[in-house]
C-alpha cells in the first residue's frame, strides 16, 4: 500500500513538472518584445531594439535574448552605440520555491560598444539632463515592485563577457582607442549596501584581451587576474606583449573619484628593438635588445586629460645595439669644434646615410609630470664618441623647451652642443652665438670667392646644413611621448 502511495506521488510530481515545462515551451516570448522595449525606455531613457528571438532554456533554466541594439533616442542619426549578439540569464531553481531569486550567471556575447566624444564635450550615449528619469523616482518604483513581489535583492554568482569589443574616439582627432576580443569572467560577486556605491561592490575576475590599440601603437595578448574592493581594481600579475616582447607588471584602477585613476608598473626584459622600429617607424632602423622599468599613473579620459595628468618615469638601457642609416662617429667628428670650420664643410653628412653604427651603450631615462617630459638621462656611446640629450618637452602644447644635443668628452663634459626649439611637427635649430659666428665665417668665405666658387660652396654648405638638421631631428624624435619614449626615431 505504501509503495502505491509513493509511486502515485512520484508520478504526480513528474507529470506536473513535464506539464509545466510543456506549458512554458509553447509560450511565445516574442510577443512580449514591444512591452519589454517600452519598459526599458521608460525606466532608462534609452531605446532598445530586440531584432532576434527571445527563447527559454531548460538546462539551465533561463532566458536568452538575441541580436540587441541600444540607441540614444536623441541622436538617432548616429545609430546604435551598443550591439549584443546575445544576452543570457540562467536561474537557480531551488531558491525560487522560497521566493528568492538567485542568478547562476549572466552572459553577454559579442558586445560592440562605440563611445564617441563630440565637439560639445558630450558623449554619444549621454541623455539630456531634462529628459533623464529622476533617480529618486526609479528607486521608489523598484522598492515598490520588490515589496509587491516580496523578493529580496537579486544575487548574481557570475557575470561573463565573451568576445567584447570597445571603441573610443574623439570627434576632433583621428586616433582611436580599441579593445579587441575581450573576455571577462567575474566571480564571487558581493555587494554591501551599507557602503557608498562602488565601495560596496567586490568581486574576483579573470580577463584576457587580444589587442589594445591607440592609433598605431598596440599591446597584445593581455591577461590578468583582478580583485575589486573598496572601489579599487588591482592586479599584481599582468602579462602582455609589447613589440613582440612578452612582459609582466602590475596595475591599479581607482574608481573612488570623479575620474578613474590608473597606476601601472612594469619591468621590461629583452625588448626587441627591431620590432619596435618596424612597428613605429615602418622600417628596421635599430637592431638589438633593451631592458628597463616603467612606472606611470594618469587619469582616464580624453587625450588632454591623459597628457595633463600623466606622471612617473620610463627608463630603457641596452648594449651592443646596431643603428642603421647613419655613422655616428663621422657625425661626431664633424660636430667637434676643435676640428674647425673646414672639417664641418668638408664632411658630407649625407654620405653617412646607408652606413651603420654599433652603439656600445644606450640609455633613456625620462621623468614625466606637470604636462612635461624631462630628458633626465638620454645618451648613447660608440667606441669613439658619446652623445647626450637634455631638455624638456611640453606634451600638451607639443613644444620643445631648452632641448640640447651635446657631444661629450671622455669625462662626460660637453665639447659642443646644439639647441633645438619649436614644436614636434616643426622643430628648428637654436641660433646661439657659436652658430651665428660659424654662419658669419661661411658668409665671409662666400663673399671672398668668385661667383662660380660661391655657387659651388653655397650649394655644398646648404646641402651639408640641411643634412645635419635631418640627422639631428631623427635623433630628437626618439623623445616623443607618442612613440613610447624610445631612444631613436
Image (spheres, rainbow, N blue to C red):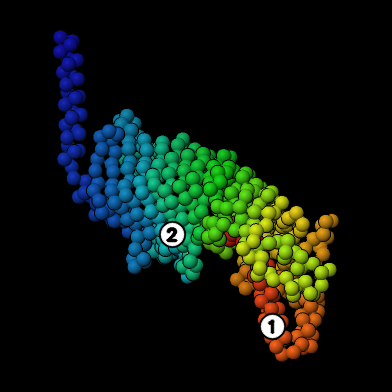
Q: Quadrant of residue 429?
A: bottom right
Instruction: In this rendered view, identify the residue nearer to me: 309 or 482.
Output: 482
Of the two numbered discs 2 and 1 on the same chain, state the one appearing first in sequence: 2
- Establish if 232 lies above or below 6: below
- Image coordinates of residue 162 in percent, x first then y, are 38, 44
413 over 53 or under it: above or below = below
Q: Residue, x 41% and y 41% (percent of image)?
A: 159
Dividing the picture into quadrants, the one containing residue 327 is bottom right
Marker disc for residue 181: none
Q: Please tell me which residue lies in front, 166 or 186.
A: 166
Judge left or right: residue 189 versus residue 287: left
Which residue is the site of mark 2? 115
Instruction: Residue 126: give x, y in percent of width and height.
Output: 43, 62
Which residue is under mark 1? 456
Q: Is residue 355 above or below residue 25?
A: below
Residue at x 28%, y 47% (from the top left corner): 65
Amino acid at each position: 500500500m505504501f509503495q502505491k502511495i509513493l509511486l502515485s506521488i512520484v508520478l504526480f510530481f513528474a507529470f506536473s513538472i513535464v506539464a509545466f515545462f510543456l506549458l512554458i515551451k509553447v509560450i511565445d516570448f516574442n510577443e512580449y518584445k514591444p512591452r519589454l522595449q517600452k519598459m526599458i525606455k521608460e525606466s532608462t531613457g534609452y531605446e532598445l531594439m530586440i531584432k532576434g528571438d527571445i527563447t527559454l532554456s531548460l538546462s539551465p533554466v533561463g532566458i536568452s535574448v538575441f541580436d540587441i541594439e541600444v540607441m540614444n533616442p536623441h541622436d538617432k542619426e548616429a545609430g546604435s552605440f551598443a550591439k549584443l549578439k546575445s544576452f543570457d540569464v540562467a536561474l537557480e531553481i531551488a531558491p525560487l520555491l522560497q521566493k528568492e531569486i538567485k542568478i547562476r550567471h549572466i552572459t553577454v556575447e559579442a558586445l560592440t560598444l562605440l563611445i564617441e566624444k563630440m565637439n560639445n564635450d558630450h558623449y554619444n550615449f549621454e541623455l539630456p539632463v531634462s529628459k533623464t528619469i529622476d533617480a529618486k523616482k526609479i528607486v521608489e518604483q523598484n522598492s515598490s515592485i520588490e515589496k509587491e513581489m516580496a523578493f529580496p535583492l537579486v544575487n548574481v554568482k557570475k557575470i561573463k563577457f565573451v568576445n567584447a569589443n570597445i571603441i573610443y574616439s574623439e570627434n576632433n582627432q583621428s586616433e582611436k582607442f580599441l579593445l579587441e576580443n575581450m573576455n571577462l569572467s567575474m566571480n564571487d560577486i558581493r555587494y554591501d549596501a551599507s557602503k557608498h556605491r562602488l565601495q560596496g561592490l567586490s568581486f574576483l575576475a579573470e580577463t584576457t584581451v587580444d589587442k589594445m590599440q591607440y592609433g598605431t601603437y598596440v599591446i597584445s595578448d593581455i591577461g590578468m587576474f583582478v580583485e575589486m574592493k573598496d572601489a579599487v581594481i588591482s592586479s599584481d600579475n599582468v602579462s602582455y606583449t609589447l613589440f613582440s616582447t612578452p612582459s609582466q607588471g602590475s596595475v591599479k584602477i581607482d574608481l573612488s573619484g570623479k575620474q578613474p585613476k590608473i597606476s601601472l608598473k612594469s619591468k621590461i626584459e629583452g625588448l626587441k628593438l627591431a620590432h619596435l622600429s618596424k612597428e613605429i617607424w615602418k622600417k628596421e632602423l635599430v637592431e638589438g635588445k633593451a631592458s628597463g622599468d616603467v612606472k606611470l599613473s594618469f587619469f582616464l579620459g580624453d587625450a588632454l586629460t591623459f597628457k595633463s595628468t600623466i606622471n612617473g618615469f620610463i627608463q630603457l638601457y641596452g648594449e651592443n645595439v646596431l643603428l642603421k642609416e647613419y655613422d655616428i662617429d663621422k657625425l661626431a667628428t664633424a660636430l667637434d669644434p676643435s676640428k674647425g670650420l673646414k672639417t664641418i664643410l668638408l664632411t658630407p653628412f649625407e654620405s653617412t646615410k646607408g652606413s651603420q653604427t654599433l652603439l656600445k651603450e644606450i640609455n633613456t631615462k625620462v621623468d614625466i609630470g606637470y604636462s612635461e617630459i624631462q630628458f633626465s638621462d638620454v645618451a648613447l656611446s660608440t667606441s669613439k664618441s658619446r652623445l647626450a640629450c637634455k631638455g624638456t618637452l611640453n606634451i600638451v602644447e607639443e613644444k620643445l623647451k631648452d632641448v640640447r644635443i651635446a657631444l661629450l668628452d671622455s669625462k662626460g663634459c660637453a665639447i659642443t652642443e646644439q639647441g633645438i626649439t619649436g614644436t614636434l611637427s616643426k622643430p628648428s635649430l637654436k641660433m646661439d652665438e657659436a652658430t651665428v659666428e660659424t654662419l658669419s665665417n661661411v658668409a665671409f668665405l662666400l663673399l671672398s670667392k668668385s661667383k662660380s666658387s660661391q655657387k659651388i660652396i653655397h650649394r655644398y654648405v646648404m646641402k651639408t646644413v640641411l643634412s645635419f638638421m635631418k640627422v639631428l631631428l631623427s635623433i630628437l624624435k626618439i623623445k616623443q611621448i607618442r612613440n613610447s619614449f624610445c631612444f631613436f626615431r
